[in-house]
Image (spheres, grey):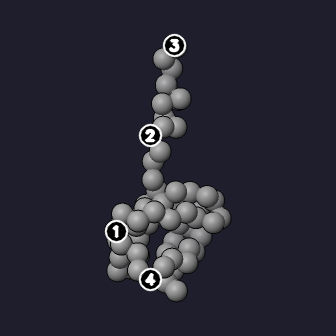
Amino acid sequence: MPLAVCPECEAEIHVDEDLDKGDAVRCEECEAKLEVVGLDPIELDLVVDDDEDDYDDDDDY
């Protein structure tokens, strides 16, 4: 089983061999949401959740 590295905590992640670009995975160590951005070698990038950013605004409701 191939290994990838979490860009958030640098933990090794075991991934399926049949991954495609754009597939989502989760780091078991830090629970980060990750997206496959490269296949040879397997590269992962953090997924930014836009819904969480909506609550960080200083707008009055």
Which label sits on residue 17? 4
Give me the C-alpha separation between circle 3 and circle 4.
48 Å
Q: Earlier in the sequence, mark 3 or mark 4?
A: 4
Mark 3, residues whose alpha carbon is within 10 Å: few (<14), some, or many (≥20)? few
Say which of marks 3 and 4 sits in front: 4
Q: Position of residue 49 (x, y in %)?
A: 47, 45
Picture residue at 63% right of the left edge, 59% below the top: 30
Circle 3: element type: loop
Q: Residue furthest bottom?
A: 1
Circle 1: element type: loop
Picture residue at 48% right of the left edge, 30% below the top: 54
Q: Earlier in the sequence, mark 2 or mark 1?
A: 1
Amino acid, disc 3? Asp
Give me the C-alpha separation between circle 2 and circle 1.
20 Å
Which label sits on residue 50? 2
Q: Are marks 2 and 1 in contact (CB under 8 Å)?
A: no
Q: Are marks 2 and 3 in contact (CB under 8 Å)?
A: no
Q: Earlier in the sequence, mark 2 or mark 4?
A: 4
From the image, tell me which residue sits under label 3.
60
Picture residue at 50% right of the left edge, 65% below the top: 25
Circle 4: element type: loop
Q: Position of residue 57 (x, y in %)?
A: 49, 25
Q: Are marks 1 and 4 in contact (CB under 8 Å)?
A: no
From the image, tell me which residue sits under label 1.
21
Q: Earlier in the sequence, mark 2 or mark 3?
A: 2
